[in-house]
Image: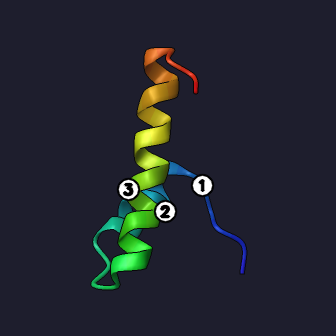
Amino acid sequence: MSVKTDLATARRMMKSPNKKTARRGLKVVKEAKRIRRGLKK
């Protein structure tokens, strides 16, 4: 299974009771925010 990186999926993943999945979703959302602000890492 590949990890989906679109925001809709990430936000849905964050609501998961599974901590690993929720953290993965949070990571994608944070990355998107960082890119939107223009601070690429």
Q: Earlier in the sequence, mark 1 or mark 3?
A: 1
Distance (Cα) linking label 2 and label 3: 11 Å
Q: Crowding at label 3, few (<14), some or many (≥20) Cα neighbours within 10 Å?
A: some
> Quick check: marks 2 and 3 in contact, CB under 8 Å?
no
Q: Percent from the top left, x then y, of residue 7?
A: 48, 50
Mark linked to residue 31 = none
Residue type, label 2: Thr
The answer to whether 39 appears left or right of 2 in the picture is: left
Q: Residue furthest right?
A: 2
Residue type, label 1: Thr
Look at mark 3 in the image and give the residue it sits on.
26
Q: Percent from the top left, x then y, of residue 5?
A: 60, 55
Q: Percent from the top left, x then y, of residue 24?
A: 47, 64
Distance (Cα) linking label 1 and label 3: 11 Å
> Quick check: marks 1 and 2 in contact, CB under 8 Å?
yes
Residue type, label 3: Leu
> Which residue is rendered at x = 62% and y = 63% of the image?
4
> Which residue is rendered at x = 43% and y = 75% of the image?
21
Query: Which type of secondary structure does the marked residue at label 3 adopt?
Result: helix
Frontmost residue, 38 versus 12: 38
Query: Which type of secondary structure does the marked residue at label 2 adopt?
Result: helix
Mark linked to residue 9 = 2
Q: Nearer the viewer, mark 1 or mark 2?
A: 1
Distance (Cα) linking label 1 and label 2: 7 Å
Q: Nearer the viewer, mark 1 or mark 3?
A: 3
Q: Crowding at label 2, few (<14), some or many (≥20) Cα neighbours within 10 Å?
A: some
Q: Residue furthest top?
A: 38
Q: Eyeballing the image, is 25 above or below 15?
A: above
Look at mark 1 in the image and give the residue it sits on.
5
